[in-house]
Image (cartoon, rainbow, N blue to C red):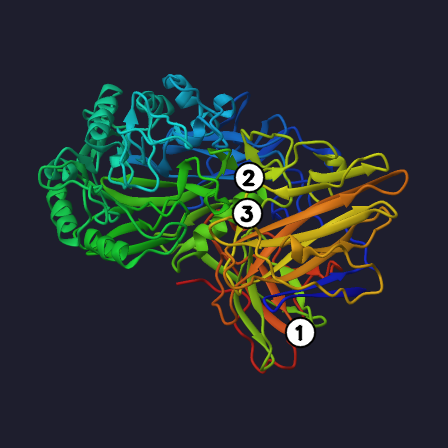
């Protein structure tokens, strides 16, 4: 084993450790199921690439855990029926796809599924008065949808100017089966609808748009009909972009929506209008039930982003149209009045800080007002990133808050906006009986369903951003309304290593509940901000179905494929020959959000040919993009294994060579500290042409772990653990009824040093005088 330490000025410190002695093959976690070996022959590590199944296996259960025999399970191409135990085998083509489970006495459910992993379909009983609602986030169809890179050339756009309703609806085709699974779908329409919405970004802003806003855009009026074709029923207009096209934009938007069918008893719009009264008027929507009745819902929306610093604000006022301006008193009045006309009230507050998952003081105050007045649901938006949830009981009524729904269909390029989800809520006679979140990813501005580790990453965030009864289950997040989940705990040892520390991966859908170590020892919890470094094709309807989502693989000298995978089914290869004119590199699409002073670790697996000249590079950028931050000093490579590279301080990139692996897989690790002023990070791997012959370098399992500050409370959102000394880790998992066989392996896998150390039940270390907890206990 050897180390290289790099000092880049006083702000960033890099430690590269390469284990040249241990060759491993880390298998991808799969659920360890306690069901028959006939049904689950591949439990445990993922199977070899060539053994991919041509079927989806799973089980269908109810909320109480009861098996649902004879449930119908179907994909786009096949259909089957669950057996007497509720389990099924569905013939299917390989890859991620949508699957729907239905039963005469239950609400149906559509989920993203894969032939690689078993699928748990939990259905909600329907007594004839139960309805399903779907909520998604910020939606628009303008700007980069016409001109992807903003260069004024429209040939690269997903929409052409003048595109019709069908072309707009096609942007949601990848999630159409998911949207079709609800009785009502609502979203935030964050754009005015215009006959002529596009203008070149480099040219003058047309007079029809707000003259003072930093960002102003529009979408075509055909988007209204496109949303109806895609299955959307209710749209919120109470946001800071509806007024981008001024008063005429409001009129044009409302006209287009009503002509498309967003009016009448079963659809509507709310949150804005030509005057204050109209902006605050609720949309009253009737949702039919299976018994022939209907549940009446009231939707109220407003924005805390008022634009009062401009001569022309964004909100409705005396003699002026716009969005409803949030105010706790007005929200309270609106909710109380709406309760007299409906079975349940839904409030949508547009506010907070962009790219911040936690609510602002204003959003908190307005949310409290809505809850106090009796709102059943508060579904918020504006930050463009997903947030956590809050479940409360007010006067005997369950209420649910989503602090921010993130983006749904939006043209933003910030990587942190690509993680998102759909929130499903089931109401029975106006009361919440179930709520959960299904994982999604924004890829090339459009939403895609997720399976595997990508889905579990999103579910971790949904379950762990806020404290509460939020349970990770089979790649989704369930709100444990009744407190029915049983908590399973396992106390395991984690062994530290040298000064760099040992890195462990928390097993899927388990989480760290507690840490005990010797006095003075510091452990850190982390989350992968890259989250697509396994290169797996775990998206439904991906633009690049062969793998490597959110990576830049186009161009010569690089390719994604099964032959280059160390774990899972996809890896990436770089290749060069002595005749190649220049090096080849691969990097992720869009930079990673970081904070100045934060600690990060880049880990991954490398397989290179003898003599391959491979380098790992990193550069920090200010939050406003621009050029890399220049640290102003030359790194000193403290190693006899390689010569220093050209001075990376000149370009702002810090680069270190990775030792050739001789055709075997070996791990690499790079520890970084973000300099003050940094807001973004870019990581790349590079292969230089050899002096003679050819050279290849294969990469897989790349992670960029952002470590939480020392002392951070453990949460389900954390996926990794860094320990320096002997530590006892309490792992926990909350299990809903019917999922007892899906608990998986509670063992820790050590990623660094990579020796496949697996922690099972062992004697307590001497440093612990008393056990932390009993191995298994029920949660109250």
Q: How far apart are marks 3 and 2 (CA)?
A: 23 Å
Q: How far apart are marks 2 and 1 (CA)?
A: 37 Å
In the rendered image of this protein, does residue 500 appear above or below residue 107? below
Label drawn at residue 455: none
Between discs 1 and 3, the one toward the N terminus: 3
> Which residue sits at x=51%, y=30%?
98
Label drawn at residue 763: 1
> Which residue sits at x=84%, y=61%?
641
Quarter of the image where the N terminus is located = bottom right
Q: Where is residue 531 in the image (x, y as percent from the top left)?
A: 57, 48
Secondary structure of the residue carrying numbered label 1: loop
Q: Residues within 10 Å of mark 3 (few under 14, many from 20)?
A: many
Secondary structure of the residue carrying numbered label 2: loop
Q: Is residue 730 left or right of residue 211?
A: right
In the rendered image of this protein, does residue 701 appear above or below residue 205? below
Q: Where is residue 135 in the image (x, y as percent from the top left)?
A: 34, 38
User: Mark 2 highlights which residue?
Assistant: 451
Label drawn at residue 591: 3
Between discs 3 and 2, the one toward the N terminus: 2
């Amino acid at each position: 084993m050897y180390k290289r330490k790099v000092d880049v000025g006083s702000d960033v410190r890099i430690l590269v450790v390469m284990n040249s002695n241990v060759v491993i093959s880390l298998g991808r976690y799969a659920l360890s199921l306690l069901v028959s070996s006939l049904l689950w022959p591949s439990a445990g590590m993922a199977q070899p690439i060539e053994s991919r199944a041509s079927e989806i296996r799973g089980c269908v259960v109810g909320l109480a855990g009861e098996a649902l025999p004879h449930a119908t399970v179907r994909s786009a191409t096949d259909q089957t029926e669950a057996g007497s135990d509720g389990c099924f085998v569905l013939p299917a083509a390989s890859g991620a796809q949508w699957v729907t489970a239905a039963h005469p006495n239950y609400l149906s459910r559509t989920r993203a599924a894969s032939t690689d992993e078993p699928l748990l379909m939990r259905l909600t009983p329907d007594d004839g008065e139960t309805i399903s609602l779907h909520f998604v986030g910020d939606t628009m169809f303008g700007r980069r949808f016409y001109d992807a890179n903003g260069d004024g050339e429209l040939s690269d756009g997903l929409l052409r100017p003048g595109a019709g309703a069908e072309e707009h609806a096609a942007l949601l085709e990848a999630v159409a089966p998911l949207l079709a699974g609800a009785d009502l779908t609502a979203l935030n329409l964050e754009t005015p609808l215009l006959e002529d919405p596009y203008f070149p970004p480099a040219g003058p802003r047309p007079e029809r748009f707000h003259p003072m806003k930093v960002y102003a855009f529009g979408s075509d009026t055909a988007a209204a009909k496109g949303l109806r074709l895609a299955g959307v029923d209710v749209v919120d207009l109470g946001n800071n972009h509806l007024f981008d096209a001024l008063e005429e934009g409001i009129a044009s938007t409302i006209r287009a929506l009503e002509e498309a069918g967003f009016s009448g008893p079963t659809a509507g719009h709310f949150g804005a209008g030509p005057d204050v009264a109209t902006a605050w008027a609720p949309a009253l929507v009737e949702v039919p039930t299976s018994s022939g009745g209907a549940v009446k819902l009231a939707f109220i929306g407003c924005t805390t982003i008022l634009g009062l610093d401009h001569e022309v604000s964004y909100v409705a006022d005396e003699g002026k149209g716009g969005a409803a301006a949030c105010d706790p008193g007005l929200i309270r009045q609106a909710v109380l009045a709406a309760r007299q006309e409906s079975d349940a009230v839904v409030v949508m507050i547009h506010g907070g800080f962009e790219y911040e998952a936690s609510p602002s003081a204003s959003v908190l105050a307005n949310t409290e007002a809505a809850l106090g007045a009796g709102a059943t649901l508060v579904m918020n938006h504006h930050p463009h990133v997903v947030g956590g949830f809050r479940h409360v009981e007010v006067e005997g009524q369950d209420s649910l808050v989503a602090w921010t729904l993130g983006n749904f269909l939006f043209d933003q390029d910030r990587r942190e906006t690509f993680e998102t989800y759909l929130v499903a809520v089931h109401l029975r006679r106006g009361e919440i009986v179930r709520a959960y979140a299904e994982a999604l990813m924004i890829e090339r501005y459009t939403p895609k369903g997720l399976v595997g580790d990508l889905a579990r990453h999103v579910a971790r965030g949904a379950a762990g951003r806020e404290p509460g009864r939020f349970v990770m289950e089979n790649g989704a997040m369930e709100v444990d309304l009744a407190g029915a989940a049983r908590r399973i705990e396992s106390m395991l040892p984690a062994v530290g290593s040298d000064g760099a520390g040992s890195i462990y991966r928390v097993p899927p859908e388990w989480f760290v509940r507690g840490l005990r170590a010797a006095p003075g020892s510091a452990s850190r919890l982390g989350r992968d901000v890259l989250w697509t470094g396994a290169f797996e094709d775990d998206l439904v309807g991906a633009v690049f179905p062969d793998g490597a989502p959110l990576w830049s693989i186009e161009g010569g000298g690089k390719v994604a494929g099964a032959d280059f995978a160390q774990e899972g089914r996809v890896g990436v290869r770089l290749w060069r020959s002595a005749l190649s004119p220049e090096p080849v590199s691969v990097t992720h699409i869009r930079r990673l959000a970081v904070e100045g002073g934060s600690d990060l670790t880049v880990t991954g697996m490398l397989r290179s040919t003898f003599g391959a000249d491979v380098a790992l590079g990193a550069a920090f950028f200010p939050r406003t993009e621009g050029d890399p931050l220049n640290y102003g000093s030359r790194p000193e490579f403290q190693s006899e294994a390689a010569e220093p590279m050209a001075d990376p301080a000149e370009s702002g990139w810090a680069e270190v060579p990775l030792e050739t692996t001789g055709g075997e897989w070996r791990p690499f690790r790079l520890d970084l500290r973000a300099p003050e002023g940094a807001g973004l990070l870019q990581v790349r791997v590079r292969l230089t042409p050899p002096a003679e012959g050819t050279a290849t370098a294969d990469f897989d399992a790349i992670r960029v772990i952002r470590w939480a500050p020392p002392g951070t409370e453990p949460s389900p959102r954390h996926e990794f653990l860094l320990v320096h000394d002997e530590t006892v880790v309490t792992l926990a998992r909350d299990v809903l009824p019917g999922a007892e066989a899906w608990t998986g392996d509670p063992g820790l896998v050590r990623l660094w040093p990579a020796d496949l150390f697996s922690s099972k039940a062992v004697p307590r270390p001497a440093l612990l005088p008393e056990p932390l907890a009993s191995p298994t206990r029920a949660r109250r």
